Image: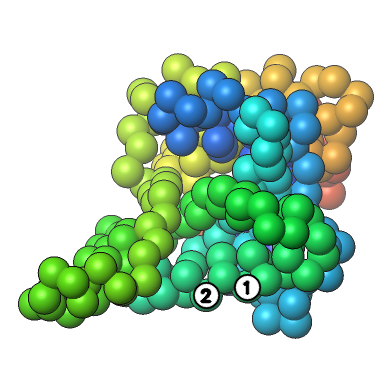
């Protein structure tokens, strides 16, 4: 599990993975206004101890018109579904706002920047948790009392709900990752790796290619072919040939 988590975090530390995740799977009109050339990882902004200690989330930001949009990406690999995920996101996004304010990341007295919370889930069990905090709070409340309850919702991306035929039509490295996760036969893996070799051929994409190789070697292939002797390779082309 630790290898899986770290390999995934390595993949989503690359701009192209996050850009393709948003482009391909946040299917809303406003996404057309995002400037993906400005996409950058949020690292040293005076992040609080609570967020620094978290190992399953990554924060990026990019321009949406004249303002920054923060993408809070939470990688969820638990064997059981966390029914209180909306409560966790409420806490994490609140901490992020506190840290951004302390670091002077938005003008004093100005509006808070928007945050897009995404939960990326690849567990075997279907996700059953509510994606809106409002759906977790006692429903039988007077209308005016309900008005005062906290609110947050998150976008759930459940990898196993996407059919291979749907993903295969996308020239998208995040979709390729989902296809590999859902693959069962060696020829399925080979087809996706061949696409990645083609898409990630540029010299500046070498680090992302190596991140895919690391994940294939440490996570996917041991799970699909237990006990197999996996040779030492560092490039996707070598992995494809293997």
Name the residue rendered at 46%, 35% in the picture.
26
Q: State if disc 1 and disc 2 touch (CB < 8 Å).
A: yes
Image quarter hosting the C terminus: top right
Locate residue 183, reporting x and y percent: 45, 40
In the depicted view, which residue is nearer to us: 114 or 241?
114
Q: Choose top left, top right, bottom left or bottom right for residue 112.
A: bottom right
SS assignment at label 2: helix
Q: Secondary structure at mark 1?
A: helix
Q: Is residue 49 left or right of residue 80?
A: right
| Image side of residue 88 versus residue 111, left or right | left
Q: Nearer the viewer, residue 186 or 66?
A: 66
Say which residue appears at 48% left-offset and 68% top-offset: 89
Percent x, y of residue 182: 43, 43
Q: Residue at x 25, y 68 (%)?
A: 147
The residue where tag 2 is placed is 91
Kindly identify which residue carries mark 1.
Answer: 95
Left or right, 189 with reference to 38? left
| 51 is higher (above) or lower (below) than 6 | below
Find residue 10 and name its label.
none
Residue furthest to the right: 203
- Residue 106 image position (x, y, % from top left): 74, 53
Q: Residue at x 49, y 46 (%)?
A: 181
Q: Position of residue 134 (x, y in %)?
A: 27, 66
C-alpha separation, residue under disc 2 versus residue under disc 1: 6 Å
């Amino acid at each position: 599990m630790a290898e899986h988590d770290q390999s995934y975090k390595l993949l989503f530390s690359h701009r192209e993975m996050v850009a393709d995740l948003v482009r391909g799977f946040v299917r809303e009109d406003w996404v057309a206004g995002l400037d993906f050339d400005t996409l950058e990882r949020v690292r040293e902004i005076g992040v609080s101890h609570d967020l620094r200690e978290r190992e399953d989330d990554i924060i990026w930001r990019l321009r949406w018109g004249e303002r920054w949009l923060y993408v809070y990406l939470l990688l969820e690999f638990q064997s059981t579904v966390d029914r209180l995920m909306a409560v966790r996101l409420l806490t994490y996004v609140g901490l992020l706002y506190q840290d951004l304010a302390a670091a002077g990341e938005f003008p004093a007295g100005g509006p808070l920047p928007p945050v897009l919370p995404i939960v990326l889930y690849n567990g075997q069990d279907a996700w059953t948790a509510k994606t809106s905090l409002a759906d977790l709070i006692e429903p039988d409340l007077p209308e005016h009392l309900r008005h005062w309850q906290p609110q947050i919702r998150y976008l759930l991306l459940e990898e196993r709900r996407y059919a291979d035929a749907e993903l295969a039509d996308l020239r998208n490295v995040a979709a390729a990752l989902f296809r590999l996760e859902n693959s069962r036969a060696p020829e399925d893996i080979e087809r996706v790796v061949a696409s990645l070799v083609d898409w990630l051929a540029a010299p500046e994409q070498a680090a992302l290619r190596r991140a895919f190789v690391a994940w294939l070697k440490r996570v996917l292939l041991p799970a699909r072919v237990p006990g197999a002797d996996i040779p030492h390779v560092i490039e996707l082309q070598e992995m494809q040939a293997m």
